[in-house]
Amino acid sequence: MQLSSTPLLAALELAFLFLLAWCHVRRKPYRATIAPVWLYFLWLTIYGVSTSLLGARGFYVSEELLRTLPGLWLALATVIAAVAPVLFFRGVRTGLREIADATPWHWFAYFHGLRIAALGTAYKTMTGEFPAYFEYLIGIPDLLFGISAFWIAQKAKKGSLTMRGFLLWNLLGAFIIVPWAPLLIQLGLPGPLHLITGTPDATAILAYPMSIAPVFGVPMFVLVNLWVAWRLLEHLNESSGTGRASDDSGNGLRMQATRA
């Protein structure tokens, strides 16, 4: 097994979600609407552990799976697992809205600062353990986004970050990955779409423990980007509907909407 920081990174991502829920409960201990979110985060944890165990068993690099074009759908499976409860359960949507509204913007920005873990893949690329094409096209942009998170966090703490600016930054964080990363992984895997044939190929990305990143860790970063963007768009639409200005800066999404 290769030495990798991806298990720790996935654990920190999940810990961040539970921290947000816990902080919200501390502020409003009698809000029953948070209970569905606890269950939702627990479901994400179970899913993450399950995908990690599958990777440890070599499932993602098995010949049977590689024949199914996994690069195109493995991350999508995680997105469906995460988004389906939000779509089907109102309590989850309500709780996520409350948590997003109560969380300072710089917390979300610092969370994406974890994406500087892409330094690990940069090192593996230099040592010939990671596909160079994927590092140049996905890894380096993702690393730069992680570095930008610290600048965005400082702007948010100073109150100089606008709602639209934070929205665009989060959308950029998702766009760096989607849809390019799944397609590029598949282009480097054995099969009918194997167009990038350098060594090492994309099977290095799906080998445990690196497999945790494309299957769970990276999709979680994108999903948090989209979670924040979703709530910001709701506030911007509410503000435009009432004819209020919506570009003031603030610390939490609810505070921002109130001041907008």
Image (tube, grey):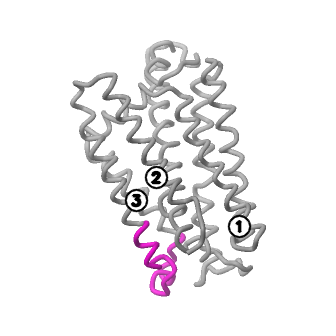
The front one of 76 and 224 is 224
Q: Position of residue 68 (x, y in %)?
A: 47, 80
Residue 17, compared with residue 217, is above or below; it is: above
- Magenta segment boundaries in residue numbering: 52-71
128 vs 163: above or below = below
**Observer-nearest residue: 89 or 36?**
36
Q: Earlier in the sequence, mark 1 or mark 2?
A: 2
Rendered position, 205 above or below 115: below
The prevailing secondary structure element of the residues shown in magenta is helix
- Mark 2–mark 3 Cα distance, whole angstroms, equals 9 Å
Q: Are marks 3 and 1 in contact (CB under 8 Å)?
A: no
Q: Which residue is mark 1?
A: 124
SS at mark 2 in the image: helix
The picture places residue 157, in percent across and down from the top left corner, at 60, 22
Where's residue 231, x and y in %? 45, 32
Quarter of the image where one finds residue 250: top right
Residue identified by numbered label 3 = 48
Identify the residue shown where x is 69% and y is 32%.
151
Instruction: Give the residue at mark 2.
Output: 11
**148 vs 93, nearest the viewer:** 148
Q: State how many labels appear.
A: 3
